[in-house]
């Protein structure tokens, strides 16, 4: 089993490195590095978005969450999918028309202020690192289960590979790795789902009936409240999931890889169909793991349930399916972390280094070097942080990143497009209040502090009781933007706003 798994791992790595090699030949300018020279078609970018979005949280975390907590685990599938309606109707087209390389470009189109750009870059780097921790935790657990390597070495392997993709191949390599990964993941998930469904005689009713007795939860397995016992926590989680996608930097930069806004819209439609089908299939992954792997075996492999999907593949299809699904999960993680590293590196090199430190005077070569060094720095920091989060469910870790994104980025994006009176002070305060409040509430919450030894990072009573801070931090982000605007002596530039509205909706004047 280990030999077969190792071989499939090598095939995945070899395939992605070949893609990176050919992409490196086409990555000579900053436009090619940041956005693949806006050369992707709608379906290609749709697949790449799906590949970027269907992360370790989706494949490993949600399957484990449903298997262990039942109905509550499916909240993640619903929230992740519905989020794309917000992206489609509010963000995709204006972002493509106003921006060039990063989210900060979009905001700077209205507020040409170094402080605004700097804070937007800070948010991008913070959110990307937060999200990346979850992917590295999933990678560490997966390789440890499959190859028997220590968690630390597993995380280091993924860290090195993701850095290679970005440093040498830029957005072109990252996009095609994500496209290949999306196809492999959909194929693997579909195969497992069909086998699970066949085990239940292709009867939804029989499947729901049998899982009632498959776990220690009994009939409560199909009821809400197994994991999220506080209704406020449930609302908070769903707010973060539904609104967070529209603020995720690594998703937002994907809209710059197409030539225009109509193509950006098409890519979201393609992505939504692919993602929608996948999240429906997570029911079969979770229920199948609960019925055919069992609660005890899932928890023994990983207390947070992150290895439920690979274990289900082993139970249903033996060594080959186990090795294939594990290799696909590995490809999933590689693709997502490459996108995250690229978004953080772009924010540092393009926004902070080029526009703030060098005042727009940096050459293409200097920007490329800065982006590559930033990629290395982001990777190292993420690896170090991931070493402390080994026992946390990856879907849950990602939901925290969504809360930070919804709190720190979404208010400023929305007000930049839709509020005439909005000004630079409001943009800065909104982003900072959202970011700081979300991070502080996570740090003083039950994910970091717990009275029980081993249940969290530190032993102690949490000051904030909700597991997800979204219900508090998201309104605070909007409130910070509103108050910052109203108390500021700066007046909004009416002419600039009118220009932005026309440009955001029509693309007229876009560079």
Image (spheres, rainbow, N blue to C red):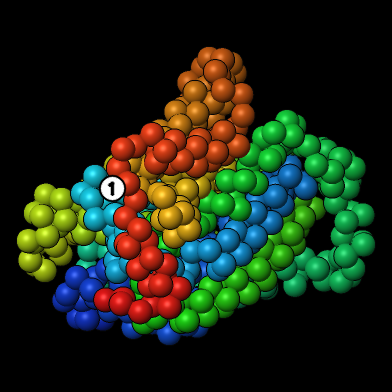
Residue at point 29% right, 66% down? 101
**Seen in the image, is 343 located left or right of residue 112?**
right
Q: Quadrant of residue 500?
A: bottom left
Q: Is residue 265 above or below residue 470?
A: below
Q: Residues within 10 Å of mark 1 (few under 14, many from 20)?
A: many
In this view of the protein, which residue sits in the foreground, 503 or 94? 503
Quadrant of the snapshot with the N terminus: bottom right
Q: Quadrant of residue 175?
A: bottom left
Residue at point 85% right, 51% down? 211
Residue at the spot of label 1: 116
Residue 203: x, y in percent? 90, 68
Residue 38: x, y in percent? 32, 79
SS assignment at label 1: helix
In this view of the protein, which residue sits in the foreground, 4 or 246? 246
Residue at point 43% right, 85% down? 41
- Is residue 146 shown to the viewer in this render? no
Residue 19: x, y in percent? 32, 77
Q: Is residue 452 above or below residue 187?
A: above
């Amino acid at each position: 089993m280990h030999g077969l798994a190792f071989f499939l791992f090598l095939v995945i790595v070899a395939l992605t490195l070949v893609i990176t090699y050919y992409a490196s030949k086409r990555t000579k300018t900053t436009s090619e590095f940041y956005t693949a020279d806006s050369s992707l078609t709608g379906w290609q970018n749709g697949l790449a978005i799906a590949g970027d979005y269907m992360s370790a949280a989706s494949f490993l975390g949600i399957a484990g969450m449903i298997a262990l907590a039942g109905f509550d685990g499916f909240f993640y599938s619903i929230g992740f999918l519905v989020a794309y309606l917000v992206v489609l109707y509010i963000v995709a087209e204006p972002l493509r028309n106003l921006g060039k390389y990063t989210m900060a470009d979009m905001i700077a189109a209205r507020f040409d202020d170094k402080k605004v750009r700097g804070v937007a870059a800070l948010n991008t780097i913070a959110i990307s690192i937060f999200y990346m921790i979850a992917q590295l935790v999933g990678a560490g657990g997966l390789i440890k289960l499959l190859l028997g390597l220590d968690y630390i070495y597993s995380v280091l392997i993924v860290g090195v590979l993701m850095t290679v993709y970005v440093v040498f191949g830029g957005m072109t390599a990252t996009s095609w790795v994500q496209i290949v990964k999306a196809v492999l993941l959909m194929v693997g998930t579909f195969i497992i789902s069909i086998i699970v469904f066949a085990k239940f005689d292709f009867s939804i009713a029989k499947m729901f009936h049998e899982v009632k007795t498959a776990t220690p939860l009994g009939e409560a397995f199909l009821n809400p409240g197994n994991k999220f016992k506080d209704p406020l926590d449930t609302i908070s989680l769903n707010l973060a999931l539904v609104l967070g996608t529209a603020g995720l930097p690594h998703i937002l930069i994907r809209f710059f890889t197409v030539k225009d806004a109509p193509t950006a819209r098409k890519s979201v439609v393609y992505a939504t169909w692919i993602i929608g089908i996948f999240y429906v299939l997570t029911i079969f992954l979770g229920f199948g793991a609960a019925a055919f792997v069992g609660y005890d075996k899932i928890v023994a492999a990983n207390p947070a349930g992150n290895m439920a999907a690979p274990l289900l593949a082993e139970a249903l299809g033996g060594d080959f399916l186990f090795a294939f699904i594990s290799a696909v999960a590995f490809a999933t993680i590689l693709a997502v972390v490459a996108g995250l590293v690229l978004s953080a590196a772009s924010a540092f090199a393009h926004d902070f280094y080029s526009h703030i430190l060098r005042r727009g005077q940096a050459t293409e070569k200097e920007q490329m070097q800065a982006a590559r060094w930033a990629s290395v720095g982001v990777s190292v920091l993420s690896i170090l942080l991931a070493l402390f989060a080994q026992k946390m469910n990856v879907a849950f870790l990602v939901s925290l990143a969504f809360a930070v994104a919804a709190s720190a980025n979404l208010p400023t994006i929305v007000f930049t497009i839709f509020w005439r009176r909005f000004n630079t002070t409001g943009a800065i305060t909104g982003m900072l209040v959202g970011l700081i409040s979300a991070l502080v509430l996570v740090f003083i919450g039950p994910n970091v502090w717990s009275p029980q030894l081993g249940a969290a990072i530190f032993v102690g009573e949490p000051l904030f009781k909700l597991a997800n801070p979204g219900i508090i931090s998201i309104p605070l982000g909007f409130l910070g933007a509103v108050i910052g605007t109203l108390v500021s002596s700066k007046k909004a530039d009416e002419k600039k706003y009118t220009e932005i509205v026309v440009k955001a909706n029509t693309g007229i004047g876009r560079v």
